[in-house]
Image (cartoon, helix red, strand yellow):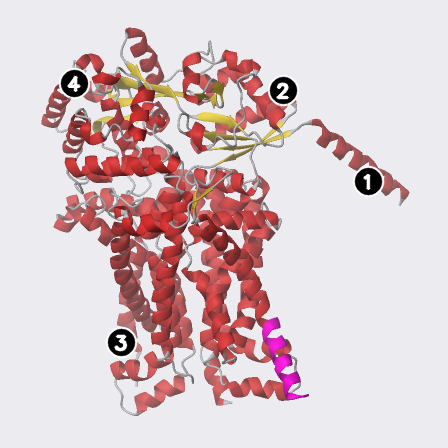
Amino acid sequence: MKRSLLALAIFAIALGGAAAQGKTVTVLFYSPELTQQYDDMAAEYQKESGNKLDLTVLQADYPTVLRARLNSGDIPDVFMSSAYADNDTYKDYVYDLSNEPFIKDMVPTALTGVTVNGRVIGYPFLVQSHSFIYNKKVFRDAGITKLPTTLKELEAVCVQLQSKGIQPFATGFKEWWVLPQTAWQALAPLPASYKGDYSTFVADLNSGKLKFKNIKEMGQVFDLLDLIKKYGGNKPMESDFNDQCASLATGKVAMIHQGNWAEDTIMKTNPNAEIGYLVGPVGNEAAKSGIMFDSNQTIRVAKDGKNRQAALDWLNWLTTSAYGKAWIPTMIKQMSPIKGAVAPAAQLAKETSAMIAKGVPSYSWYYQRFPSGLEQGLGIVLQGYCAGQTDRARTLDALDQTYAKIAKAAD
Amino acid sequence: MTRAPRLGWLSAILFALAIVYLYPLFLVVINSFKGFAEIMANVIALPSAPTLDNFANAFKRMEYPRLFLNTLIATLVGTTGVVLLSSVAGHKLSRTKTRLSWIVFIFLVAPMMIPFHSFMIGLVKVAKSLHLTNSVWGLGVLYWGLGVPLATFMFHGFVKTIPTELDESAIIDGCGPLRKFFLVIFPLLKPVTVSVIVLNAMWMWNDFLLPLLVLSGNKQAMTLQLAAYNFFGQYKVEWNYAMAGVLLTLLPAIVFYLALQRQIIEGMVAGAVKS
Amino acid sequence: MTVLGKRIARGVEFAALTLPAVAAIVVVVMVPFGMSVVNSFMKWNGLDKKPVFIGLANYVELFTDDPNLIAALIFTLFFTVAMVVLTNVIALLLALALNQPLRGRNLLRAAFYVPNIISLIVIGYIWRFIFSKGFDSMYAATGFAPLNLSWLGDPKLAFASTVFVSVWQAVGFYLVIYIAGLQTIPYDIVEAATLDGAGPIRRFFDVTLPLLMPSVTVAVFYSLSNALKTFDVIFSLTYGGPGTATTSIALDIYKTAFSDSRFGYGMAKSVVLFLLILVVGLLQIGFFKKREVES
């Protein structure tokens, strides 16, 4: 009896000792395609610091779960969101990182999306690009040597591909989110009067001073969508992300509109696929056509999280340690917002850097500045246009109506 | 009167119909034996080199044994509570023909008409304050409130098929109301009870949204559906594991359903009425 | 015992037996829904710590200035009629067939039930493949024209597709209810009718169906409220698309509350949806209960 009591006591002390050591930071992330990388990083962090990351990774319904938890008081120490408009959505819950030591190690342009009134309220996670991805082998086999930079050239390429029996596009139009990323790229240089000033552009849309139906460049957007649909096979509205990746990887189609996050799925389908970026046409102005490049996926530290300091310690490690700096480029194989990070060994990332170095226009993801909810709201209106539910005039009205409602509700 | 030939033909039609009906499930099965690239290339083709790798991997990644137990606990606690609460209340309400009874009945049944999304955020808040979150036992308790409406409706209706003489005969025996109910009436409700068990156990086993909302803070408490769902990302669906995971989650439910089917004994009420 | 004493005793017994169920409903549904009703009078994005009280503004907006909601309402009404009729008729026919002494009957019952327990995400993905890629292959093989139509991409055809998949998924559930109901019909009553010379159709309408009314009431009521609330199948099959062609009221509410970040407005819409279902449901129960026969 005495011996077992002793054993119990020793056991309890050992247990207590172990528990007192490391702190646990609760983390709620999305992008479950990166679960393996998240887990490996957490394991490494625990080895190096003794602190534990309690990771929960979700996808669809992420916003719903996050809302439910924030509302009920079950606040995760660290969570994830978009940049720009989400700064406002989560403003009551995020911690100001401006004075943290690791912020100076971030590339300044990556911080634009998370800075509000001079305060940095998010930690940029990934730097990503999107545009038209093309299958190099398919282009070669079809005899296409010059990459298109205008709408007319893109159409000519489509005609040429079709004459060789290849479907030019897998539209992806079944996913509402493919519509905004495709459409807004065609508007990226903005109407001339704005001179590329996205803040004012969005502010004017918010106040109602500017309406989509008065932006004549919307015509280019519709022209581009019409083109993709025309050359997108016989069931263009049924093509989803999987269809896009599978079809491009196997060479069934020549082009898709996607981003560097698609590379993983494409390469897993066909490890020998050779892919690259085409610029997104802005009407017929070749000089303005470019790619979309920004840091949008953002890590946020909860202001009221129980282990806030431990969360900050973790971010510091992620930014300054050798493993942390290499994590995004070498393990996630995407571009990192940390200064001096190496370039990832991924085809689209390489193309992005090369194009930027060559002076190809790279536009920020300005459409993330639209009030929260509009990415989907406007995307669905555009999807309705592509499905033939509304004509251009009615679509423009619907865009304006949807924008007005959500902007009003957000202010 | 011979019925065999006519039934043979009916049987054949039904089997043909069932095969067509299950074609999507057939696709899930054949794809669970293929590798990722092969699935992406052609969903409809039979696997060229069937492999059990997906099942092994999914089993491991889903931490199957532990999550199986979790899901089982939530389902058992939930189903048992629903059956007990609803049978007792449904019977009492059906036998009591007063205005109050009708009002209480509507009150119990009305939640069926409230879309879950419209109160789920509030539910999470209430659950948290009652310490029912992040626990599969708590989840089971929450299920009581969600399963009672339909179950009460079903019990309420079927109690009508049991003659009131039986209720009265039990009173003469000197039983208290609960004892009377469970010893005399409850056994007669067997077909309905089995249906209620089947329907509730099945949806609780497969439920996704409520577990997602209340268990997300505790990885130890995850259910099988949540784990299977993690194979479906926006940018990467790990089809091979997803299909295997779906089957691993589905199989226990099918086995349970088949086992319960044998419990429905026909003519039970007919026998009771006769005597 | 005095008359009053007996009354009190009966009242206490009533309360004791029904209270557990009532308590469960209050805690899990009524209180949370009450919170949502309060939120319906607020301008709130679901996150801000200080919602703003705006009185009836949300309700005014939804009745006067929401074309998406009107479209969703029309879709939902047509969908509900199609769904309730098809699901119940098919489930009842199958239940009658599967109530006969057939070989492999349990297996057949399970076969038709299984779609009801497959994860809806999977159902969405698989049917998407079947409608686009599957149909492509079958069309190439057979040349059967309807296979070449865009069943999920054409706004008009998408309606039929969502009804089809929803019915496919739901029938098994109502099959269970109808089979249980058929079990409670005393065989001797049916036999008596047969001996009286009634053919199968007359037997069904004069004997079986009236005794089956409790099941029919439950099934129709449940399928009616489920159809009005339809969300899951549409969410995974089309996400309400293309555009808003297949958006049901429940999906519109979800998008409003969680995607547009207009939580208060979304709650106002759900209160109205609930009232709609309540009115339709009560009318239906009242109508059917009159036709139930106690044995």
User: Does residue A175 show up?
Assistant: no
Whether the magenta-drawn stretch holds residue A217 is answered as no
Chain ID of residue with mark 4: A
* Circle count: 4
- Left or right for C115, reference B78: left
Chain ID of residue with mark 1: A
- Residue behind mark 2: A48
**Residue placed at 53% from the left, 47% from the top?**
B124
Is label 2 on the same chain as label 4? Answer: yes
Task: From the image, state whether disc 2 or disc 4 is nearer to you.
Answer: 4
Is label 3 on the same chain as label 1? Answer: no
Q: Mark 1 and mark 2: span between their CA atoms?
A: 30 Å
Q: Which residues are magenta?
A: C1-16
As displayed, is residue C8 above or below residue C143?
Answer: below
Task: From the image, state whether disc 2 or disc 3 is nearer to you.
Answer: 2
The x, y position of residue B12, in whole percent, is: 28, 67
Q: Which mark is residue B6?
A: 3
Task: From the image, state whether disc 3 or disc 1 is nearer to you.
Answer: 1
Is the Cβ of the residue at disc 1 closer than 8 Å to that at disc 4? no
Our reading of the magenta stretch's main secondary structure is helix
